[in-house]
Image (cartoon, rainbow, N blue to C red):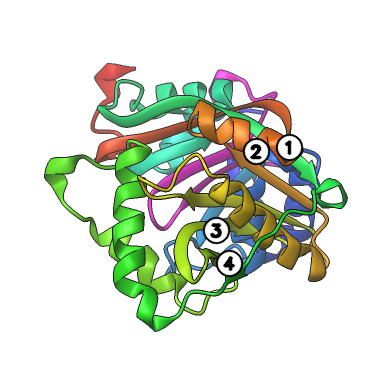
């Protein structure tokens, strides 16, 4: 597998069939495909997919309009990664997530291996059958316009806690955008205790039968009370009522991992998160390979 071609609408069914064989590490790829197809060039999650030439899909290489690299190509040789790098030369990249070995191979081929990185970490990957979800009290609700300032603060703090921003940067446009998008969204819930918001949980990739969690947060001063665990349980209970049967996530720290394990999540591998300090153009760092 050395030459790649751009995938089109006629490849969508075969693309998803291949990615379904790797469910825990293909959520962004599959959710973007389901929501935007192969040809969306406007939405930041719209994604361009590349596959090996020929009729059989044995690997998937992709870049979103927002500049995030994605791949599911466990058997790809170096020539395939080099072909992908050549196809996206000149594109601006903000980061990559995926299986650690594949992320390393891709970043080497694209000349981005040295960063500089805001986040470069292998995080434990978890999976849960929602039928095993414990019955926890979870008074969750959908965010409302009155929550906007609170959520802007929470998302900004979440970015600091996870290493996605620095204190001197101040609240990011991304944090404000995430807060605005959360209002009235079915993919975000706020947990309340006696009428006071104490935690949030969200979904960053959704399929009819599977959701991937992200943006789980409890503010300082309220941690250690099981609020995040209850927020996740409440969100997943809503998902189960909609027919979702599986959930996956990757944990940023040991406390989060402990909370997820208490909910029954099973450790199924590792997931690399690689976020650049500043976006880089593929081809500008060829000497770094």
User: Mark 1 highlights which residue?
Assistant: 265
| Residue at mark 2 to residue at mark 1: CA–CA distance | 6 Å
User: Mark 2 highlights which residue?
Assistant: 260
N-terminal of the two: label 2 or label 3? 3
Residue at 59 percent across and 56 percent down: it is 231
Span colored in magenta: 52-79
In the rendered image, residue 247, in percent from the top left (x then y), is placed at 72, 49
User: Mark 4 highlights which residue?
Assistant: 187
Residue at 69 percent across and 33 percent down: it is 261
| Residue at mark 3 to residue at mark 1: CA–CA distance | 16 Å
The residue positioned farthest toward the right in the image shown: 131
N-terminal of the two: label 4 or label 1? 4
Nearer the observer: mark 4 or 1; the answer is 1
183 vs 97: above or below: below
Mark 1: give few (<14), some (14-19) or many (20+) Cα within 10 Å.
many
Q: Are marks 4 and 1 in contact (CB under 8 Å)?
A: no
Mark 3: give few (<14), some (14-19) or many (20+) Cα within 10 Å.
many
2 vs 13: above or below: above
Instruction: From the viewer's perspective, tell me whether residue 277 is left or right of residue 263.
Output: left
Q: Do the residues labelled 3 and 1 touch (CB within 8 Å)?
A: no
Instruction: Evaluate whether residue 29 shows in this view.
Output: no
User: Mark 3 highlights which residue?
Assistant: 202
Name the image quarter holding the C terminus. top left
Residue at 73 percent across and 54 percent down: it is 136
Mark 4: give few (<14), some (14-19) or many (20+) Cα within 10 Å.
many
Residue 69 within the segment the image draws in magenta? yes
N-terminal of the two: label 3 or label 4? 4
N-terminal of the two: label 2 or label 4? 4
Q: What element carries label 1?
A: loop
Q: Do the residues labelled 3 and 4 touch (CB within 8 Å)?
A: yes
N-terminal of the two: label 3 or label 1? 3
């Amino acid at each position: 597998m050395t030459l790649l071609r751009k995938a089109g609408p006629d490849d969508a069914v075969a693309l998803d069939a291949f990615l379904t064989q790797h469910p825990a590490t293909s959520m962004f790829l599959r959710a973007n495909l389901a929501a935007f197809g192969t040809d969306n060039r406007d939405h930041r999650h719209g994604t361009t997919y590349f596959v090996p030439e020929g009729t059989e899909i044995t690997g998937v290489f992709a870049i979103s309009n927002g500049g995030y690299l994605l791949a599911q190509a466990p058997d790809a040789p170096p020539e395939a990664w080099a072909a992908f790098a050549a196809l996206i030369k000149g594109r601006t990249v903000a980061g990559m997530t995926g299986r650690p070995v594949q992320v390393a191979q891709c970043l080497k081929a694209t000349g981005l291996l040295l960063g500089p990185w805001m986040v470069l970490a292998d995080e434990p990957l978890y999976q849960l059958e929602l039928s095993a979800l414990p019955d926890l009290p979870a008074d969750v609700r959908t965010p409302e316009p009155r929550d906007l300032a609170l959520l802007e603060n929470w998302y900004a703090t979440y970015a600091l806690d996870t290493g996605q921003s620095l204190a001197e940067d101040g609240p990011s446009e991304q944090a404000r955008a995430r807060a605005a998008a959360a209002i009235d969204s079915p993919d975000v819930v706020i947990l309340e205790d006696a009428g006071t918001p104490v935690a949030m949980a969200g979904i960053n990739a959704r399929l009819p039968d599977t959701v991937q969690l992200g943006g789980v947060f409890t503010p300082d001063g309220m941690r250690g009370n099981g609020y995040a665990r209850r927020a996740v349980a409440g969100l997943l209970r809503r998902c189960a009522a909609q027919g979702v049967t599986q959930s996956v996530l990757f944990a940023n720290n040991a406390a989060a991992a402990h909370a997820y394990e208490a909910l029954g999540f099973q450790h199924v591998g590792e997931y690399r998160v690689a976020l650049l300090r500043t976006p880089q153009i593929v081809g500008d760092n060829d000497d770094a390979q």
